[in-house]
Image (spheres, rainbow, N blue to C red):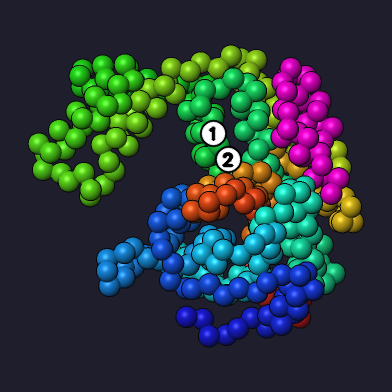
């Protein structure tokens, strides 16, 4: 493990105390399943996996949000509650090393989501301003909920909405999905019996057929994806291939994704888009407008905050606000965060607990501090 503790640790810890947070120290070894299920494709490929003595799959923590949420559920602590952390995370094939420090705040249970979102952004901005005094910062915002509201308003079926929502945050995946949506690929070469079951949407019959084929081939259903999962995916792919989006709807989706404006003009830009396309974005737009006002109330420089409708972050658990803060164009982000209102329920919480948070990359901050010295 990395032995050198960050030089700016004391400054960060002091800021966290001033921001009324509870410092938390979560275990380095974590259950792997929550990360494999919810952490996003890119992060899943980078996780260090191991096993316990009982055969349970574990991993070195690749980030802090999921462990902090698991600890909160286990402790049965009340909400709202704000947690802060500073410690090492571990990811394979990362430029700059496999072990590095992150710090951040997870804000759980505040039902005023606009206020909590704005506070999370302001906390991240304050931390970077403290660590890099005088250095201009650029903020990019996106909104998973607005994106999904546009998909629903366009009348896309659930399968396509799910695929596009999963692609949000990856330019390559989103472009590939849009290409398939505009020009659906032909059906693959399936055996006649399988093709019939797929076209009929017969999940039970297709699952049984796949299970029998695996048994005949000597394959164990427990060694990979379950027959029902394979069958569900085959049927979903067939449903996606059957969709033909109208030219007007496809044009509207591309127009939405091209929106890139400063935050003080973003609500009007979304209203104008919705009006021109004849769409209702409902609560998602109302929440966006409330958050924009809450961000402005923190006094952050409006000209440095941009809303990019195509911007997302490559973690599967985000449900609303997503953001990154960087020091200069083309450089890796220094901080990233967002809202994850479904995460705690998926992790086992008995009641819905809204959440929003951010992390900062300490090694990137220290590299910039070194450049300035």
Numbered tag placed on residue 168 in the rendering? 2
**Residue 138 found in image quarter:** bottom right
| Horizontal and vertical percent position of residue 303 | 86, 49
Q: Is residue 356 left or right of residue 4?
A: right
User: Which residue corresponds to the image point at 25% horizontal and 36% vertical from the top-left?
Assistant: 227
Q: Is residue 154 left or right of residue 167?
A: right
In terms of secondary structure, what is the magenta stretch mainly? helix
State which quarter of the image contains the C terminus: bottom right
User: Which residue corresponds to the image point at 71% horizontal and 82% vertical from the top-left?
Assistant: 10
| Horizontal and vertical percent position of residue 262 | 82, 43
Task: Give the SS element for disc 1.
Answer: helix
User: Which residue corresponds to the image point at 79% horizontal and 66% vertical from the top-left?
Assistant: 126
Instruction: Say if 56 sits above or below 154 in the image.
Output: below
Numbered tag placed on residue 21 in the rendering? none
Tell me, yes or no, if residue 370 can be seen here: no
| Horizontal and vertical percent position of residue 151 | 61, 27
Tell me, yes or no, if residue 305 can be seen here: yes
Q: Which residues are magenta?
A: 267-294
294 and 329: which one is in front? Answer: 294
Q: State yes or no: discs 1 and 2 in contact (Cβ < 8 Å).
A: yes
146 and 253: which one is in front? Answer: 146
326 and 301: which one is in front? Answer: 301
Instruction: Using a 10 Å C-alpha cutoff, classify the residue at mark 2 as few (fewer than 14 neighbours), some (14 to 19) or many (20 or more).
Output: many
Q: Is residue 281 magenta?
A: yes
Instruction: Say if 314 sits above or below 8 in the image.
Output: above
Q: Is residue 288 magenta?
A: yes
| Horizontal and vertical percent position of residue 255 | 70, 27
Task: Give the SS element for disc 2.
Answer: loop
Instruction: Using a 10 Å C-alpha cutoff, classify the residue at mark 1 as few (fewer than 14 neighbours), some (14 to 19) or many (20 or more).
Output: many
Name the residue beneath numbered marker 1: 164
Q: CA distance from mark 1 to mark 2?
A: 6 Å
């Amino acid at each position: 493990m990395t032995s050198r503790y960050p030089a700016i640790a004391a400054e960060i810890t002091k800021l966290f105390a001033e921001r009324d947070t509870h410092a938390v120290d979560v275990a380095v070894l974590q259950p792997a399943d929550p990360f494999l299920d919810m952490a996003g494709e890119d992060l899943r490929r980078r996780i260090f996996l191991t096993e316990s003595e009982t055969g349970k799959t574990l991993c070195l923590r690749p980030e802090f949000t999921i462990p902090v949420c698991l600890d909160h559920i286990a402790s049965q602590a009340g909400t709202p509650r704000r947690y802060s952390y500073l410690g090492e995370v571990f990811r394979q094939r990362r430029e700059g090393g496999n072990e590095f420090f992150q710090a951040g705040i997870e804000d759980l249970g505040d039902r005023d989501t606009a206020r909590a979102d704005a506070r999370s952004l302001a906390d991240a901005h304050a931390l970077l301003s403290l660590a890099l005094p005088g250095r201009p910062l650029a903020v990019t915002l996106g909104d998973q909920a607005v994106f999904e509201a546009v998909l629903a308003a366009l009348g896309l079926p659930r399968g396509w909405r799910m695929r596009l929502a999963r692609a949000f945050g990856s330019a390559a995946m989103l472009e590939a999905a849009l290409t398939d949506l505009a020009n659906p690929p032909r059906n693959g070469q399936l055996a006649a019996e399988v093709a019939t079951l797929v076209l009929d949407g017969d999940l039970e019959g297709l699952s049984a057929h796949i299970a029998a084929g695996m048994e005949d081939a000597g394959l164990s259903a427990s060694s990979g994806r379950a027959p029902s999962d394979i069958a569900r995916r085959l049927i979903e792919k067939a449903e996606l291939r059957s969709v033909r989006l109208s030219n007007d709807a496809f044009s509207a989706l591309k127009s939405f994704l091209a929106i890139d404006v400063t935050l003080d003009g973003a609500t009007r830009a979304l209203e104008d888009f919705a009006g021109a396309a004849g769409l209702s974005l409902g609560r998602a737009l109302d929440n966006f407008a409330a958050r924009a006002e809450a961000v402005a109330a923190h006094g952050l420089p409006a000209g440095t905050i941009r809303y990019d409708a195509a911007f997302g972050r490559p973690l599967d658990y985000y449900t609303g606000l997503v953001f990154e803060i960087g020091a200069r164009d083309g450089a890796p982000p220094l901080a990233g965060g967002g809202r994850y209102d479904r995460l705690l329920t998926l992790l086992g919480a008995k009641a819905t607990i809204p959440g929003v948070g951010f992390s900062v990359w300490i090694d990137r901050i220290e590299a910039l501090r070194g450049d300035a010295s």
